Image: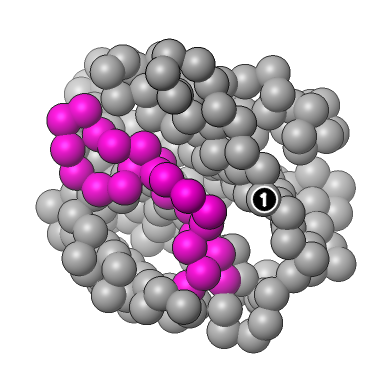
């Protein structure tokens, strides 16, 4: 099992990440450009959305403004892009993601990462990434997990140019407390963190002094 705090401390740029455990889910965003860093999380009726912190500095909203988290019936959907809405509207996790592919931001070709959590404790993770110019769609289905354990998926392996896509199966991690995760994220690159622990939602936003 990977020590999640040490992993984050030693990885300055995993990009965007989803961690799912038995009683909690975390989603964070990081940024290197001014446009990516100029964001905060805000709560909505059914989840959260990203917003520009300073609207005057917003240069391209297409890939940075979206609903990362939405409740859909008994399911909770968590993603790093507007595929959240595709999953909610189609009502079928796999079928919805079969209609989508990685983000059109060459040369990085940022993967789309997604999760859906069911009321019975089972959950699914997915990554859509570019391999030799084609979209590789990977799905990972879990019947649940033990207390204190979780599974983590991020867009990137780490920093680089172009940014290297996440490889392999989701990491099996321990699930520390929200404050520890926020503190472990790289100070320069972290932007926002969503946490939902036993149904309680908290938002951490660098621009708001969290």
Label count reads: 1
Picture quadrant where residue 98 is located: top right
Q: On the rendered image, what quadrant is the C terminus found in?
A: bottom left
Q: Position of residue 11 (x, y in %)?
A: 23, 59
The colour scheme used to paint the residues is one colour
Give me the residue at 84% from left, 63% from top. 119
Q: Is residue 127 visible?
A: yes
Q: Who's the residue at 85% across and 54% down the image?
A: 74
Q: Give the residue pinned by disc 1.
A: 140
Which residue appears at 61% of the width and 71% of the height? 21
Q: Label 1: few (<14), some or many (≥20) within 10 Å?
A: few
Q: Between 137 and 190, which is closer to the camera in this rendering? A: 137
89 vs 205, left or right, is right
In the rendered structure, the answer to whether residue 192 lies left or right of residue 120 reads left
First to last magenta residue range: 150-173
Q: x, y (%) of residue 8?
A: 29, 65
Is residue 99 positioned above or below 65 on the image? above
The one of 172 and 63 positioned closer to us in this rendering: 172
Is residue 153 within the magenta segment?
Answer: yes
Q: Can you tell which quarter of the image residue 179 is in?
A: bottom left
Q: Position of residue 84 (x, y in %)?
A: 64, 34
Q: Residue furthest bottom?
A: 147
User: Residue 64, can we see it?
Assistant: no
| Residue located at (41% from left, 74% from top) | 2
* Secondary-structure class at tag 1: strand
- In the displayed structure, 73 sits above or below 162; it is below
Q: Is residue 10 magenta?
A: no
Residue, far front: 132
In the drawing, does residue 30 fall left or right of residue 90? left
Q: Residue 33 at what x, y percent from top left? A: 18, 31
What kind of secondary structure does the magenta stretch mostly adopt?
loop
């Amino acid at each position: 099992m990977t020590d999640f705090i040490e992993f984050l401390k030693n990885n300055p740029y995993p990009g965007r990440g989803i961690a799912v455990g038995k009683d909690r889910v975390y989603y964070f965003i990081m940024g290197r450009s001014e446009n990516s860093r100029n964001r905060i999380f805000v709560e909505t009726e059914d989840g959260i959305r990203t917003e520009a912190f300073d609207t005057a500095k917003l240069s391209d909203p297409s890939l940075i403004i979206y609903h990362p988290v939405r409740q859909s019936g008994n399911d909770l959907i968590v993603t790093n892009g507007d595929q959240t809405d595709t999953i909610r509207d189609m009502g079928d996790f796999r079928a919805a993601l079969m209609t989508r592919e990685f983000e059109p931001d060459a040369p990085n070709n940022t993967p789309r990462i997604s999760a859906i959590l069911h009321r019975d404790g089972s959950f699914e993770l997915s990554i859509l990434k570019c391999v030799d110019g084609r979209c590789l769609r990977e799905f990972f289905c879990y019947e649940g997990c033990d207390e204190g354990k979780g599974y983590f998926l991020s867009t990137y392996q780490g920093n680089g140019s172009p940014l290297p896509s996440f490889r392999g199966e989701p990491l099996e991690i321990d699930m520390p407390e929200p404050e520890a995760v926020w503190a472990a994220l790289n100070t320069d690159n972290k932007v926002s963190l969503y946490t939902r622990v036993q149904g309680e939602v908290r938002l951490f936003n660098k621009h708001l002094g969290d």
